C-alpha cells in the first residue's frame, strides 16, 4: 500500500507540472505589457524602461521565465494584490477554510443522498421509487447551480423569510448562538451544491450497483444464505463504489466550478468569490494564485480518490 | 442480461421477424419508446422555433426604454414583464435565446471536432503517440475548468474585442474557450471505439483491398463510431449552454446589450425581492433547454447504442 501511495504521488507531479505549463502558456500568450503605464509616462526614457524589463527578466527566453515563475509559485511567493496590497498567500489563506468547509459539507450531503437513493433504486429497478428517483436526479443535474441558488433565495429568504441570504462573517454572538447563526447561513449554499452533486452521483451509484448486482459472486453469496442486507453492503456496494470513485474524481473540477457560482450568489467569503472580485478589479496576481490553488485542490482530490481506490480494491495496489 | 447478447445476433433475429428496416428507421423506432425523450424533443423544437421566428412575431425592440413601465409583472402588453429600464423581457429573451443556443451548438461543434480529431489520431496511432495524447486528455480533465475559463476570458477579452468588434469578439472567445475545455470525453470515447473497431473483420477486409489509412478512418471506422459520438455531442450542447450561462451569470460573459439568458439572470439577481419574474423566466428557459437536451441525449443513447437494445 505504501509503495502504491508513493507511486501515485509521483504520478501526480507531472500532472501538476503540466497544469502549470498550461497556466503559464495562457499567461505568456496574453496580450498586454506590464510596462504599458511606463511607456506613456514621458518622464521615463525608453532606455530606462528597457533596463527595467531586462533586470526583471522579461526579455529572458520563455523556458527560463517559466522556471523562475514556477519556482516562485512553489515557494509561495505569489506577489501582492494590486487592490488591497496584502500578500496574495495571506489573502488566500484567510479565505480557503470557508471554501473547504462549504465544499466538504456539500459533498457529505451529496453522499448522504446519492448512496441510499442510488442503492435502493438499483436493488428495485423500474419500480415506482426508481422511476421517481431517476426523473428527479435528471432534473437535479439539469438545474444549473446559479438558478437553484436564486430559487432558494426567492423561496426561503424572500417568501418564507426563514434563512438569511447574505453570508455574514462578523456575527457578534458567542457559544451556541454563534454556531447556530453560522449553520443557518450555511444551509442554502451547502444545499445548492450538495443537491446538484447528489443528483449526479445518484445516477452513477445506480448504474454501478446495477452492473455489479447481476455478477456471479452475488448469486453465490445469496446461495450461501447470507442475509440480503449483508449481500448488498459487503458484496455489492463495495464493488460498485470502485467505478463511482473514478467518476466522482472526474467530477471534481465541476464541483469547484459550482462552488465558485454558489459563493458568488450567497456572498460566501471563500476563494471563489475572491476570484470573481479579483477579475472584476483586474487584480492579476490574485487571479493567477487562486487558479493555481484550484488546480492543486483538484489534483489533491484525485490523489484522495486514488487512495480510496486502493482501499476499495486491494488488487489495484499490488499491481 | 441485455449487455451479454451480441448485437449482431439480435439484429439478425429482428431482421427475420420484421420487414427489413434501415438502421436509422430502427433507431427512430427505439427512440420513440423513450417517452420522456419524445416529449423533450417536442418541447425542444418548440423552444428552437420560438427563438428563431419569435422576434418576427413579437417585433418589440429589445432596447426600448420605457420608465413608465419599470419592473412590471407579466401583463398583456408585456407577457413576461419588464426589467428595471422598462425593456420588454419577452423580446429580450427571444433574442438572447438565439445567442444562448447558438453558443451551445457552435461550442459543441468545436468540442466534437477536436475530440474526434484527437481521439481518432490516438486510436489509429496507438503506442507512444496514443499514450501522450491520452496524458494530455487526462490533464485537461483535471484542470479546474471554470477558473481557467475565467482566467482566459479575463486575459484575452479586451484585445479580441478590439480585433473583431465587441459582439463577435466575445462570441468567438466564449465558443472557442468552451469548446477547448469540452472535447475530452469525446476524444476518450472515439479512441475506445477505434480500438475495438480497427480489429474488426470489415476493416481488415478494407485494408486487404488496399484502402488507404485515411479512407479506412473516414469511410469505415468513423461512421461506425458515430452513434456514441452523436449522444456525447447532444449532451455537450447542454454543457455548453450551462457554461455560457454561468459565465454570463458571473458578469464575465456577454456585455449587457446582448441579453443572453445567463446575462438576464445576472441583471435580475439584485432585484429578486420585487421583480422575481425577471429571474424566473430566463432561469426556466435555461433549465428547460438543458433538461430537454439531456433527455433527448438519453433517448438517443437508447436508440443508437445497440448493446442496450432490448
Image: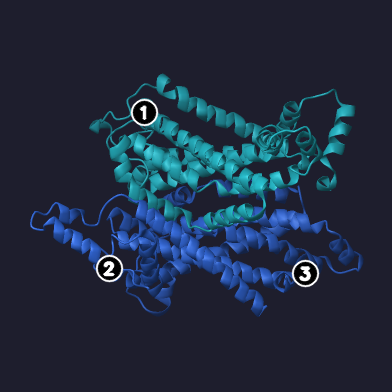
Chain colours: A blue, B cyan
Q: Nearer the viewer, mark 2 or mark 1?
A: 2
Mark count: 3
Q: Secondary structure at mark 1?
A: loop
Q: Residue furthest left?
A: A43
The reply to whether the C-beta atoms of the residues labelled 1 and 3 are less than 8 Å apart is no
Residue A80 is marked as 2
Residue B257 in sight from this viewpoint: no
**Residue B217: image tag:** none
Subunit under mark 3: A
Q: CA distance from mark 2 to mark 1?
A: 50 Å
Instruction: Give left or right: position of A17 versus B161.
Output: right
The percent coordinates of residue A302 (x first, y second) are: 57, 65
> Residue at point 54% right, 60% down?
A252
**Do the residues at discs 3 and 2 belong to one chain?**
yes
Residue B202: image x %, image y %? 79, 36
**Given this view, does label 3 or label 2 mark the residue nearer the observer?**
2
Instruction: Tell me the element at label 3.
Output: helix
Residue ID for mark 3: A234
Is label 2 in a helix, a strand or a loop? loop
Mark pair 1, 3: CA separation: 60 Å
Q: State the mark number for residue B78.
A: 1
The chain identifier of the residue carrying mark 2 reads A
Amino acid at each position: 500500500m505504501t509503495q502504491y501511495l508513493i507511486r501515485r504521488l509521483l504520478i501526480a507531479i507531472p500532472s501538476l507540472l503540466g497544469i502549470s505549463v498550461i497556466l503559464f502558456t495562457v499567461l505568456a500568450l496574453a496580450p498586454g505589457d506590464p510596462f504599458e503605464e511606463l511607456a506613456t509616462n514621458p518622464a521615463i526614457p525608453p532606455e530606462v524602461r528597457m533596463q527595467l524589463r531586462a533586470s526583471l527578466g522579461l526579455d529572458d527566453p520563455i523556458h527560463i521565465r517559466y522556471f523562475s515563475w514556477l519556482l516562485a509559485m512553489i515557494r509561495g511567493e505569489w506577489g501582492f494584490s494590486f487592490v488591497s496590497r496584502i500578500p496574495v498567500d495571506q489573502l488566500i489563506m484567510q479565505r480557503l477554510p470557508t471554501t473547504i468547509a462549504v465544499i466538504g459539507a456539500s459533498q457529505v450531503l451529496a453522499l448522504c443522498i446519492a448512496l441510499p437513493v442510488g442503492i435502493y433504486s438499483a436493488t428495485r429497478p423500474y419500480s415506482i421509487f426508481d422511476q421517481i428517483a431517476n426523473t428527479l436526479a435528471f432534473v437535479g443535474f439539469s438545474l444549473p447551480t446559479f438558478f437553484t441558488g436564486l430559487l432558494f433565495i426567492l423561496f426561503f429568504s424572500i417568501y418564507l423569510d426563514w434563512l438569511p441570504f447574505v453570508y455574514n462573517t462578523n456575527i457578534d454572538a458567542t457559544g451556541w448562538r454563534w454556531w447556530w447563526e453560522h449553520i443557518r447561513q450555511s444551509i442554502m449554499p451547502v444545499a445548492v451544491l450538495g443537491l446538484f452533486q447528489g443528483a449526479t452521483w445518484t445516477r452513477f451509484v445506480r448504474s454501478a450497483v446495477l452492473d455489479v448486482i447481476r455478477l456471479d459472486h452475488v448469486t453465490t453469496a445469496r446461495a450461501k444464505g447470507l442475509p440480503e442486507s449483508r449481500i448488498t453492503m459487503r458484496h455489492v456496494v463495495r464493488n460498485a463504489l470502485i467505478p463511482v470513485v473514478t467518476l466522482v474524481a472526474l467530477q471534481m473540477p465541476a464541483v469547484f466550478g459550482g462552488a465558485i457560482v454558489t459563493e458568488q450568489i450567497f456572498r460566501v467569503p471563500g476563494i471563489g468569490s475572491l476570484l470573481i472580485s479579483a477579475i472584476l478589479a483586474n487584480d492579476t496576481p490574485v487571479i493567477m494564485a487562486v487558479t493555481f490553488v484550484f488546480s492543486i485542490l483538484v489534483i489533491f482530490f484525485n490523489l484522495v480518490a486514488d487512495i480510496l481506490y486502493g482501499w476499495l480494491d486491494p488488487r489495484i495496489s499490488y499491481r | 442480461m441485455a449487455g451479454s447478447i451480441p448485437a449482431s445476433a439480435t439484429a439478425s433475429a429482428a431482421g427475420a421477424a420484421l420487414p427489413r428496416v434501415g438502421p436509422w428507421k430502427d433507431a427512430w423506432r427505439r427512440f420513440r419508446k423513450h417517452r420522456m425523450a419524445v416529449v423533450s424533443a417536442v418541447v425542444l423544437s418548440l423552444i428552437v422555433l420560438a427563438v428563431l421566428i419569435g422576434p418576427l412575431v413579437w417585433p418589440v425592440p429589445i432596447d426600448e426604454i420605457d420608465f413608465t413601465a419599470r419592473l412590471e409583472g407579466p401583463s398583456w402588453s408585456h407577457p413576461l414583464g419588464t426589467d428595471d429600464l422598462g425593456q420588454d423581457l419577452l423580446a429580450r429573451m427571444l433574442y438572447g435565446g438565439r445567442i444562448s443556443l447558438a453558443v451551445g451548438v457552435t461550442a459543441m461543434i468545436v468540442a466534437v471536432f477536436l475530440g474526434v480529431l484527437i481521439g481518432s489520431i490516438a486510436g489509429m496511432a496507438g503506442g507512444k503517440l496514443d499514450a501522450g495524447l491520452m496524458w494530455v486528455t487526462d490533464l485537461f480533465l483535471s484542470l479546474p475548468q471554470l477558473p481557467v475559463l475565467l482566467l482566459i476570458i479575463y486575459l484575452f477579452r479586451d484585445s479580441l474585442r478590439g480585433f473583431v468588434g465587441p459582439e463577435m469578439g466575445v462570441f468567438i472567445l466564449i465558443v472557442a474557450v468552451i469548446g477547448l475545455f469540452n472535447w475530452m470525453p469525446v476524444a476518450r470515447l472515439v479512441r475506445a471505439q477505434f480500438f475495438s473497431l480497427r480489429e474488426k473483420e470489415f476493416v481488415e477486409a478494407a485494408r486487404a483491398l488496399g484502402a488507404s489509412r485515411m479512407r479506412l478512418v473516414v469511410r469505415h471506422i468513423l461512421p461506425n463510431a458515430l452513434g456514441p459520438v452523436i449522444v456525447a455531442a447532444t449532451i455537450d450542447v447542454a454543457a455548453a449552454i450551462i457554461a455560457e450561462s454561468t459565465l454570463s451569470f458571473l458578469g464575465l460573459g456577454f456585455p449587457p446589450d446582448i441579453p443572453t439568458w445567463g446575462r438576464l439572470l445576472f441583471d435580475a439577481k439584485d432585484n429578486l425581492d420585487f421583480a422575481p419574474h425577471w429571474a424566473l423566466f430566463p432561469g426556466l428557459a435555461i433549465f428547460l433547454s438543458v433538461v430537454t437536451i439531456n433527455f433527448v441525449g438519453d433517448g438517443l443513447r437508447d436508440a443508437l447504442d445497440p448493446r442496450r437494445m432490448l
